[in-house]
Amino acid sequence: MNLILTTSTASAGGSTLILMLVMFAVFYFFFIRPENKKKKAVEEMRSALSVGDEITTIGAITGKIVQVTEDTVTFETGEDRVRIQIKKWGISTTAKMEAAEAEARAAKSRKK
């Protein structure tokens, strides 16, 4: 009788381990991996900034880049030509990136 209880307990522990591994895989492929891909794309965008690019900051200020250094960007806003200097990590998107995202959304909606 003890042998049967021991066997069923061991198989329950094995199924719990398998369930935990499956849950971790789901979290990885649906949450962690896409977030890492997004971070990598944003980092590549920030390192590829150049003079003349249209940008949007995290604070929703838009403008055109006039100077790029190793860790800062200077850009002009509007026709009054006010220059603002910010750190690269403060840049949210570029016009190129927004256009590519809009095109991807349009292509996805055409497939449906």
Image: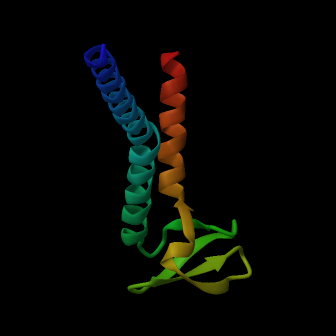
Left or right: 17 in relation to 109: left
Left or right: 1 in relation to 91: left
* Residue located at (69% from left, 69% from top): 59
- Residue 109, percent across and down? 55, 23
Residue farthest to the right, as pictured: 80
Figure check: 22 above or below 49: above
Which quadrant is home to the N terminus?
top left
| Nearer to the camera, 33 or 77 | 33
Figure check: 15 above or below 65: above
Residue farthest to the front, as pictured: 1
Q: How many marks?
A: 0
- Residue 37, percent across and down? 38, 50
Figure check: 13 above or below 87: above
- Residue 90, percent across and down? 57, 74
* Residue located at (48% from left, 53% from top): 97
Within the image, what quadrant is residue 75 found in?
bottom right
| Nearer to the camera, 104 or 6 | 6
- Residue 72, percent across and down? 48, 85
